[in-house]
Amino acid sequence: MKTIQSLILIFLIIGESGLRGKETNDSYTSIFDGKSLKGWREAPKGKALAWSVEDGVIRGEGKENRQVYLIYSGDESLSDFELKFSYRLLTKGNTGVETRARLDKTGKRDFEGYHADLGHVGIGDQILGAWDFHFGKGTRKEFPCPRGASLTIDENGKGHHAKIENAVAVAEIKEGGWNSCQIVAKGNHFQFFINGKLSSEFTDKLKGQQLKEGFIGLQLHDRGMIVEFKDLFLKNGQ
């Protein structure tokens, strides 16, 4: 009996280790240990920290009227990658993930980057499931790429939109519940999936002004909003 109990205990330990380990079978790496913000940093810093870990999830709580990012500092020069995560909004609000981000030297905002936009159910397709473009002041036009749209920015900087067939619908996004997301960045093509379905995508062909590498940052937008993230896994394409 003791032998069987010992084997069960060993099996459970190995199983838990496999789930918590850095490498997964499909070559994704866990970038959140479920206990701390090790490997992450808050930026810009304010009077009170906005990001914490509670009950095994990353929690962002807006305490000031400003945008605050939680930057993954394990690799701040990501180019091609795939990111998987789950999020839930416990209040109304605007959140998302900044990709290939860098400091905005023009002073328009803290960072510029390609932004996978998320918000509460009902906020509208210009935000929930959209791509947003955060470029420096006077550098580039920021085209709309709402949920359900496939955008191509051509070599001359003009935008062309097409409809995504069978894109994720707002009814398929859980209000106040956990939703699984995936961001795929490959070359100049970016895709954003919610609950297993494509939400929006774009291709940036404007040579010389593309964002080719940078960091990943979780976004907290406004005072009073609360967002949580968990199950963050990264596959570096290089």
Image (cartoon, rainbow, N blue to C red):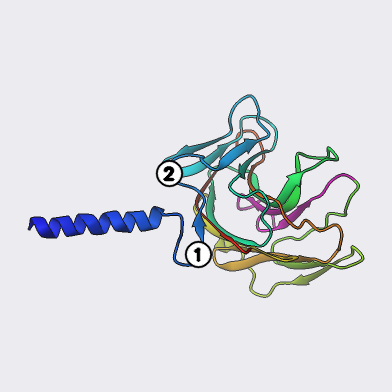
Earlier along the polypeptide chain: callout 1 or callout 2? Answer: 1
Task: Report the residue marked by disc 2.
Answer: 56
Camera-side residue of 147 and 99: 99
Residue at 70% in and 72% down: 164
The residue stretch that appears in magenta = 115-137
- The answer to if 129 sits in the magenta stretch is yes
Residue 152: percent from left, percent from top: 81, 68
Q: How many marks?
A: 2
Amino acid type at circle 2 is: Gly
Q: Is residue 186 above or below residue 64?
A: below
Q: Is residue 48 above or below residue 222?
A: above
Camera-side residue of 199 and 10: 10
Camera-side residue of 64 and 206: 206
Q: Is residue 132 left or right of residue 8?
A: right
Q: Quadrant of the C terminus?
A: bottom right
Which numbered marker is on residue 48?
none
Which numbered marker is on residue 27?
1
Q: Is residue 168 left or right of residue 158?
A: left
Q: Quadrant of the N terminus?
A: bottom left
Q: Quadrant of residue 60?
A: top right
**Secondary structure, magenta segment, majority class:** loop
List the single residue furthest toward the top: 47
Q: Are marks 1 and 2 in contact (CB under 8 Å)?
A: no
Residue 84: percent from left, percent from top: 55, 59
Residue 116: percent from left, percent from top: 68, 55
Report helix, strand or loop for mark 1. loop
Q: How many other residues sit within 10 Å of disc 1, few (<14), some (14-19) or many (≥20)? A: few
Q: CA distance from mark 1 to mark 2?
A: 23 Å
